[in-house]
Amino acid sequence: MTQYLLSIYQPDGPAPDPEFLEPIMRDLAALNVELQAAGAWVFAGGLHPAESATVLRPSDGEILVTDGPFTEGKEHLGGFTVIEAEDLDAALGWARKLAGVTTLPVEVRPFQH
Amino acid sequence: MGDHGADDAATEADIARVFRLEYGRAVAVLTRTFGNIDIAEDAVQDAFAAAVQHWPSAGVPPSPAGWIITTARRRAIDRLRREASREDKYAQAALLAAARSGTGPAPAADEQFLAEQSGVEDVDDDTLRLIFTCCHPALARSAQVALTLRLLGGLTTAEIARAFLVPEATMAQRLVRAKAKIRDARIPYRVPKGAELPERLQSVLAVVYLIFNEGYTAGPADSPARSELCTEAIRLGRLLASLMPDEPEAAGVLALMLLIESRRAARFAADGGLVLLAAQDRGRWDSALAAEGQELVRWCLRRNRPGPYQLQAAINAVHSDAATAGETDWAQILQLYDQLLAVAPGPVVALNRAVALAELRGPVDALAAVEGLGLENYYLFHAVRADFLVRLRRYPEAAEGYRRALALAGSAAERRFLEGKLRSPAFGGAGAV
């Protein structure tokens, strides 16, 4: 079994309306239950907005602390799920569900083990 | 050369032939045995190096494939045992995988094993697994193509780099990254089933046809490595069609490639310029390749499960049926393009359909059909449109079209063809370019 990080990327800007988010959060909770029932769930969490991030950067023997996020782009990491799966096809199967539920792009990456 | 007389002695050509036929199958079997592509490749290369040493004197063994697989397996196990004793975790994992596969550390008698029907089926299954792994959608298309040529075609990294006009170091890095992704992300070694299969098969067929197209665009002025891609793609197409007899699209892509390839000798003029279908010397078409393609098209028609490759093959079969360009059954071609547009809508299909429309209903309808296709960056769009304009005697617009096509054309053969068009007296002669 391999563990995979499923990162959910969301566009920058204000959060969507609660009426839009509410069914998504409900489906997401149901997916987490499904992952747990299948023994594939390791960890999952949503993150506060990217503006809440702080970056620490080693420089000349010092650690500089600056306001985040680390990369400025059009999207940021909105949340992630860690799963355990037999192989990439199985992981992609779960990631497909996650992308469908969140309506957001999902990146799948294997953990080193 | 050897002690066994000229009949038994293997020549370099014999070994090269076995290599072409068996390299991919051997890598496929060894990949399953050891669960690792790099180990499989190294082992199969070792085995062929051993064949080059032994076969010239000892002769080609009765089952060359069995000999290669047995030798590769033994050498891999010897090497892995040495590495495993030095705490190499990949080597240990590979030995474990080999032991689990049941034919591991004590190699079974592969020659008998392969001779039995079940053994051949196993090799076929492994070959299909390797094809689907190489063409896995989690890999970039360029990596899928490179892996397929490397692992199934046995092409060297240098050969693939030459064929795709990239530096060898770039191609080497592309292959290393792709194999690392297969290993690290655990891309499975499996033939997809059920609902997954159609989409995954599309990816495999697209890779084979892309390899063919790379070779197809190469003219006499290009390196032979490029046109040899067509031969390689057809070899892969035959393999795929034989391994997936229930998939008419696999037969379709093979038929399409055979029919297009049958016209290779007629497709280029003496000066290296492109010769369009209508102007080709049909006596120079390869009738054996065409007949094979047409037979496959008929087989597909009987199966009655049409798909984009089968329909394109059928269109090409209609062209191959016509002894002269004037005898082309354009009505049938238009009907096939209508079907193709229904299953695979797209502007390039619409452009090709317009060519048939021009033959049947004239250039006015055809010109109207190509407006608004959004193909302004595609050289053939301008060339086809210019051809309709010539038929309407709208020469200045036609010349402008050919010039725009010339600016966008990718290959030397295409450019030579378009320069020839622009030298036509209708455009005021030689000065028009």
Image: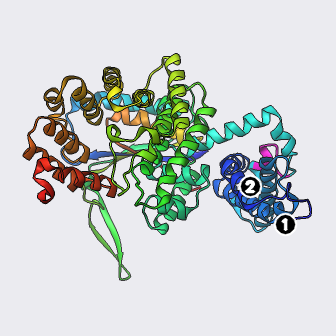
Return the disc, 2 or 1, that comes first in the chain's sequence. Answer: 1
- Three-letter residue code for mark 1: Met
Label 1 is found on which chain of the structure?
B
A65 left or right of B153?
left
Q: Quadrant of residue B117?
A: top right
| Residue under disc 2 on the same chain as residue under disc 1 | yes
User: What's the mark number on residue B378?
Assistant: none
Q: Is residue B188 above or below residue B60?
A: above
Q: Is residue B37 magenta?
A: no
Q: Is residue B57 above or below residue B65?
A: below
* Residue B376 image position (x, y, % from top left): 18, 45
| Residue named by callout 1 | B1
The stretch of residues the image draws in magenta is B98-105
Could you say which is closer to the camera, residue B66 or residue A77?
B66
B257 left or right of B79?
left
Q: Residue at x 41, y 54 (%)?
A: B218
| Residue named by callout 2 | B14
Dot 2 crowding, Cα within 10 Å, few <14, some 14–19, many 20+:
some
Q: Main secondary structure of the magenta part?
A: loop
* Res. B210 in view: no
* Residue B125 image position (x, y, % from top left): 68, 36
In the rendered image, which quarter contains the C terminus of chain A? bottom right
* Res. B87 in view: yes
Q: Is residue B414 above or below residue A66?
A: above
- Three-letter residue code for mark 2: Asp
